[in-house]
Image (spheres, rainbow, N blue to C red):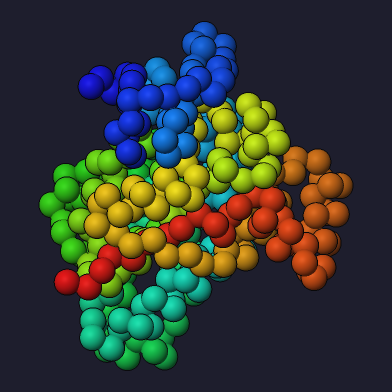
Amino acid sequence: MSIDTFESCQVCDNPGYSIFGRKTGYDRTVTYTFKKCGRCGFMWVDPFPGYGVYDDKYYRGEGPDPYVDYASEYETGRHGARLPEFKNLWELTYNCILKISRNDKNLKILDYGSGAGGFMDSARSKWPNEWLTDAQLEIQGFDTGSYASRPANEKKFHILTESELNSLSGFYNVITCIEAIKHVREINLTMQNLSRLLKPGGLLILTTGNMRSLAARIAGMNHRYLIPDIDISLFNPACLAMLYWKHGLTPARFKHNGILEYNILKSIRNPRLSEIAAAALPVPGFKRFVDMLYGVSAMPCAVKPQA
């Protein structure tokens, strides 16, 4: 099957799909089709737009996604609205490592889709020392965008090449895959790799949009996750869990408070509305309501069963 178009679902192999909608790409020269599996609800984009869009313009927020400005974060080291997201990720990572650190003195974390290195930068500054004793903790990254090598060359992070990644197996205690799976065309190959890379008992922290959420259903083709140049693989909780099981992983759910907070704030471009939303975050029940609306915590992460 050509990577340019898929005529059957990658998750459940169902040959039946419907046309969810069509959109013109960022450069207005190509019209893309959003296809939806009639069995599991997985959605994908045809034809495949390629990965060339992830250039320096994209990281400056001048590409198809206006909600990113990773270049400023990289240059200043200040992550602003992303700090609650990074804190949430580190808490999940930290809690997982605490459970396994007694038996493993060589602890490894992989940020898959590391981009400009924001999470790695934040995590490195938060590494506690008191519980590590004689353990060694290292965070590594992997990406293919135009910033892929910069965190390695300028901030001395270990950013793996594709050949290095393919040579590893059962290597990482925790893998983070934050808003990256939606950019991936061959999701089975990606999930197979993530499963292979995890140690038994390891945790995959994966976040992506919930296309079965109330917000997604209300917005339809106007949903902010439907940017065809970059949002090419779209999930709901059931089909994501199905993909995990298919590749030997067990779904696990967590409460994503900080990740949810970041998703709220980054979606609001109006500064005044952003201030109002930030003020509303501590109000009891507000984040819970938004979580129900967008279904963030309903999207499962995964663990690799012990052998």
Q: Nearer the viewer, residue 190 or 87?
A: 190
Q: Position of residue 40 (x, y in %)?
A: 42, 39
Residue at x 65%, y 30% (from the top left corner): 220
Left or right: where does residue 196 sit relative to residue 62?
left
Q: Nearer the viewer, residue 164 or 20?
A: 20
Q: Nearer the viewer, residue 266 or 161?
A: 266
Residue at x 23%, y 81% (from the top left corner): 104
- Residue at the top extreme of this rendering: 29
Left or right: where does residue 67 sit relative to residue 194?
right
Residue at x 33%, y 31% (from the top left corner): 14
**Quadrant of residue 251 in the image?**
bottom left
Say if 121 sits above or below 96 in the image.
Answer: above
The answer to whether residue 92 is visible is: yes
**Quadrant of residue 279 in the image?**
bottom right
Left or right: where does residue 25 sit relative to residue 148?
right
Residue at x 86%, y 47% (from the top left corner): 272
Say if 256 sits above or below 145 in the image.
Answer: below
Say if 263 sits above or below 254 in the image.
Answer: above
Say if 256 sits above or below 234 in the image.
Answer: below
